Amino acid sequence: MEELKKVCYVVTKTDNVATAMADIEAGEVKLTGDAPEKRAGVLAVEAIPFGHKMALCALHPGDRIIKYGAPIGIVTEEIREGEHVHMHNMKSAYDFRSAQLDPMTAHAKDIEYKTY
Amino acid sequence: MKEELLCQGYLRKDGSKGIRNKVLVIFTVECSKHVCRKIADYFQGLGEDVEAIGSHSCLHNQVNIRRLLKYCTHPNVGGVVAIGHGCEYTYPDLLAEAAEKSGREAAWFYQQEAGGTQKSIVKGMAIVREMLDKLKETPRVPMYLSDLVVGGECGGSDFTSGLAGNALVGSVFDYVVDHGGTAVFEELSEGIGLKEYLMERGANEKVKVDIARAYDKTVDFCAAYGQFSIAPGNMDGGLTTIEEKSMGATVKSGSRQIQSVLKVAQTPVCKGLHLLDVIPDEKLEPAHFIAADPSDMLELVAAGCHVVFLVTGRGHVVGTPVSPVIKVTGNPRTYERMSDDIDFCAAPLLTGEESREAITGRMMELLKRVCGGEPSNAERMGHREGILYFNFQNPTEVPACWDFGKGGH
């Protein structure tokens, strides 16, 4: 699994994100899966956690995130090529509640663990 | 189409073929659960295939009665002992009667009449002992892929689920369907954003309309609760939105046409791929959210599944009391950590170490061994979860099938 440390997996050619196959540090990343032709690599501009997504191009608020060739969410903040794409810069087009979750830990902020 | 041998099955008197030869001890209410569990525990300790399952409520519910009847007549079940408390709505005699009509060994009694806990346990044990002896005579016959009904479920998903685990189960579904078998998937609440995609896979106009209706109902249901089927663990595992999770989840249905939309406790009337709709029709009833993976797998069992695949990314442990569960993960870290529970690692699909065809072949071999009697890890660990929650659906619309009348179960 050693060589997977610098690999991101692209599900379909038309995707604008790729999935990190290991915890990836900033730097040159190899693309596998259905990567677009002549696009062997991308420069990760920050760390991408295992299983999380990296932008394959610059994305702007309102753009759609494409994975599996399908829209999986809407961009909420400017995203640079090679940046980590997660709950802090994208949201669901359907699920309004998950947009309220903590963007990093996904903890529900609308439920209190306290008694009266 | 060439028939492919699956295993030696148990032939039931109604013509169905099972992969296990179980006795179900059914409680009709929480009050008779203890007695049923004690009986099942005793025989499980002896390595016998005896399970306790039942309804917890003193009240009854039409969907729940239908489920119980499906378990009583499931192909994996050879005998039923229904034990009631004595004052609840659900009738043990009518459950036993349905089992008997389908050619199963059947018995029933009320614990109030039998004289309470101790006497009911002794009475139930004697009945089960006699049934197990009779079930030894169950004829064994060749069972083919065309006789098989498989189910697919995912739980504890992470980014690998869609890329590897569900992708593999999708290939198995295609393989089973192409060999004349039947496959059932559910989790429309994990199909959000995929209305057009799913409708396109409907075998005819009627099925397309059924899919659209079930989809719209699911979106409304989730919106009404403000709760979509995605949880913190999924996000920690790299998933972001319900749409992303949905794409990954729906991959497990493979690529074949959808023959019908089933309601809870409805079995497919033709072979091929079917979509099970578990969302209530008539009342905003939180059954689906309370249910979680084990109860959802029991819904697949009530749809007639002999065996259920459970795809996980972060790890899973559960099983059902009626049908074996085969667990698959695409996450190599999870497999290493939980290999006592997880049956199959699909990670070689992700790394490119193994072709889809080769890994599907390996999974089919495991499926045949489990159908042939080898315990899956959930069975080895003694997992038999699942609670039957009330649901409100109207099943009067028979699902349409493009080859209606051919085959069937």
Image (cartoon, grey):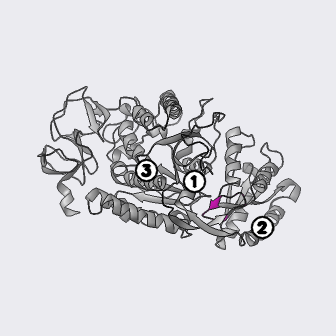
- Any part of residue B345 in sight: no
Highlighted magenta segment, given as a residue range:
B13-21
Q: Amino acid at mark 2?
A: Met
What residue does disc 3 label?
B156
Classify mark 2: residues with Cα within 10 Å, few (<14), some (14-19) or many (20+): many
From the image, give the main secondary structure of the stretch colored magenta: loop
Q: Nearer the viewer, residue B15 or B156?
A: B15
Disc with the residue nearer the chain's start (2 vs 3): 2
Q: Nearer the viewer, residue A59 or B114?
A: A59
Whole-angstrom CA distance, mark 2 to mark 3, is 38 Å
Mark 1: secondary structure: loop
Which residue appears at 50% of the width and 63% of the height? B4
Residue A45 image position (x, y, % from top left): 13, 43
- Of badges 1 and 2, nearer the viewer stands 1
Secondary structure of residue under mark 2: helix
Q: Chain of mark 2?
A: B
State the image coordinates of residue A62 (x, y, percent, origin top left). Answer: 25, 25
Chain containing the residue with disc 1: B
Q: Residue furthest top?
A: A62
Tag 2 residue: B125
Q: Is residue B99 left or right of residue B10?
A: right
Q: Is residue B16 magenta?
A: yes
Q: Is residue B94 left or right of residue B388?
A: right
Residue B305: image tag: 1
Task: Name the residue nearer the viewer: B201 or B329.
Answer: B201
* Subunit of label 3: B
> Viewed as shown, does residue B167 lie left or right of B384?
left
Labels 1 and 3: the sequence-earlier one: 3
Can residue A101 be seen here? The reply is: yes
Dot 3: few (<14), some (14–19), or many (≥20) neighbours within 10 Å? some
Spatial CA distance of label 1 from label 2 is 28 Å
Say which amino acid is labelled 1: Cys
